[in-house]
Amino acid sequence: MNKKVKTKRKLKLRNFILLSFVFAFFCLFFLYCYTLPIKNIVIIGNHYISDYEIILACDIKDYPAIFRLSRRKMKEELSRLDYLKDYQIHRNLLGRFTIQIEEEIPLFYNRNKEKLIFESGKEITTQEIKGVPILINYVPDDLYERLLKEIKETNQDVLKLISEIEYSPWKTESVMIDDTRFFLRMNDGNVVYVNLINFEKLNNYMTIYSTLGNSKGILQLDSSLGNGITFSPF
C-alpha cells in the first residue's frame, strides 16, 4: 500500500511540475507577444499614397507593440486615405509589420466639377492633382459617360502623357460634323484630335510618336478612313 501511495504522489508531483512549466511557457509567450515592439515596417503596392501617410494612419511611427494595435482604429484611419481601395495587414512574431496596399487608379481631373475621377467610378473633391490629365471644359452627360468608358480602356502610360483634355466638337458654321471629338494637349508638345469611336487608337500613341523624330505638330486620330492617322507639323 505504501508503494502505491508513493507512486501516486510522484505522478501527481510530476504532472504538477509539467503543468507549471506549460503555464509558465504560455505566460512568457503571452508577455513576449504583448510587449513585442514593431521592428520592421514593410509597405507594398503603394504609388500615390506615401509610406509616411500610411504609417501615420496606422499610428506606428513610434514602433509600438505590434499585437496591441487596434484593427478597428487602423481601418477607420486608413479609410480616410482618398487613393486607398483595399489593404491587408500582416504581423509576425519577429516584429515584422507588413501592409499590402491596393490603390484606386485615378483617370483624370474634372475641372468643371473640381473632382478627381477614379477607375472604379469614385470621385473626390480635391485641388491636388497627381500626374493625371485635366478635363478643362464641360462635356454633355451622354458623351461624358462614353468618355469615361474609353479612358478606362486607355493604357495608363499613354494617359500620363496627356496634359489636358478639351471637348472640341467639329462643326462648320451651323453644321455639326462630329460632336464626339476631343482635343488633347500632350506633355511632349504635340496635340491630338480624337473622337470617341476612335479613342482606342490612343493606345498606339507611343508607336506613332517614335516615328515622328523631333517633329512636333497636330496628330489627327479622328478619321475612320484608312489607318485614320494624319500628322501635320507646326
Image (cartoon, rainbow, N blue to C red):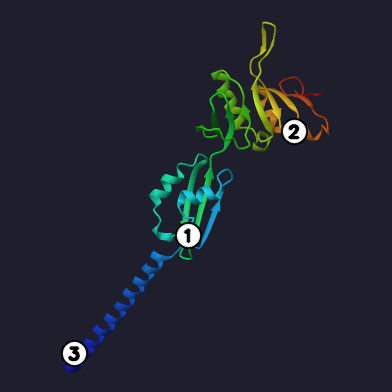
The residue beneath circle 1 is 63
Q: Residue at x 77, y 24 (%)?
A: 218
Amino acid at pointer 2: Asp
Q: Quadrant of the N terminus?
A: bottom left
Whether residue 172 sits left or right of residue 61 in the image: it is right
State the mark number for residue 188.
2
Q: Nearer the viewer, mark 1 or mark 3?
A: 1
Label 3: few (<14), some (14–19) or many (≥20) C-alpha neighbours in 10 Å: few
N-terminal label among 2 and 1: 1
The residue beneath circle 3 is 5
Q: Secondary structure at mark 2?
A: loop
Across and down, in percent, residue 84 comes to 50, 42
Q: Secondary structure at mark 3?
A: helix
Mark pair 2, 1: CA separation: 44 Å
N-terminal label among 1 and 3: 3
Q: Residue at x 51, y 49 (%)?
A: 54
Mark pair 1, 3: CA separation: 55 Å
